[in-house]
Image: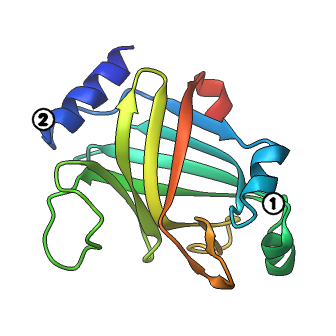
Amino acid sequence: MRSITFISAMLAAGVAGAQEFGGECWARDYSAEHLAKYPEQTVAKLRIAFKPWEDMAGVADIRATMAENNYTRTDGTAGKSYSNVLLCNIHEGGSGWPNWLEAGRMTCQGECDGGFFQVVSLEPGALTIRTEGVAVSDGTGCGSTLVADVSKGDPNRTVLTTFRLESAPPGVCQ
């Protein structure tokens, strides 16, 4: 609970700095019914573990298991798991960033131009993030697939995607 309270205060105050994440785990397993209703969704399971790291607000260790659908079968990613570690800080705004990002919100960015996500809301037991694609890898490079929905009619393009995750015990994110 202390961690949720701390992150909420950080988001509300828009303050980057000395305090760190406390090891939160957020998870979501999408049902077959949900994935059938949203065939453009490429992610079946998503895990995010926030951890402290050096002078940053923290890092986000993200893991995704890809859905079984036409896109992922064609792409060769169906049912496979991928991961990445993103650096997190409070977004300060400015040029060069997509206009949907809000200043003062926690934003986590991958290396190697690996995309980013922003925390949209945090409430007790629920975390909502938005991304245009976070590159995740099978461990053989900077990122081989994206955590984002594909555009209807254009499976080579990802779209702004919102994921709502639930608080989970730390072991779920390991």
Give the residue at x 56% y 50%. 62
Give the amino acid type for the residue marked by disc 2 in the picture: Ala
CA separation in Å, label 2 and label 1: 38 Å
**Image-based side of 115 in relation to 78, left or right:** left
Q: Position of residue 135 (x, y in %)?
A: 55, 69
So how many labels did they put on this image?
A: 2
Residue 65 numbered mark, or none? none
On the image, numbered disc 2 is attached to which residue? 13
Q: Secondary structure at mark 1?
A: loop
- Residue 148 in sight in this render: yes
- Quadrant placement of the N terminus: top left
Q: Which of pointers 2 and 1 lies earlier in the amino acid sequence?
A: 2
**Image-based side of 169 in relation to 89, left or right:** right
For label 1, the crowd category at 10 Å Cα-Cα, with few meaning under 14, some 14 to 19 and many 20 or more, is some
On the image, numbered disc 1 is attached to which residue? 80
- Quadrant placement of the C terminus: top right
Out of 34 and 172, give the one closest to the viewer: 34
- Residue 52 in sight in this render: no
Residue 107's image quarter?
bottom left
Q: Secondary structure at mark 2?
A: helix
Up/down of 100 relative to 58, above or below: below
Residue 109's image quarter?
bottom left
Q: Position of residue 44 (x, y in %)?
A: 74, 51
Out of 104 and 161, give the one closest to the viewer: 161
Residue 72's image quarter?
bottom right
Q: Position of residue 22 (x, y in %)?
A: 38, 26
For label 2, the crowd category at 10 Å Cα-Cα, with few meaning under 14, some 14 to 19 and many 20 or more, is few
Give the residue at x 51% y 68%. 133
Give the residue at x 29% y 30%. 7
Q: Position of residue 96 (x, y in %)?
A: 22, 79
Give the amino acid type for the residue marked by disc 1 in the picture: Lys
Give the residue at x 84% y 66%. 69
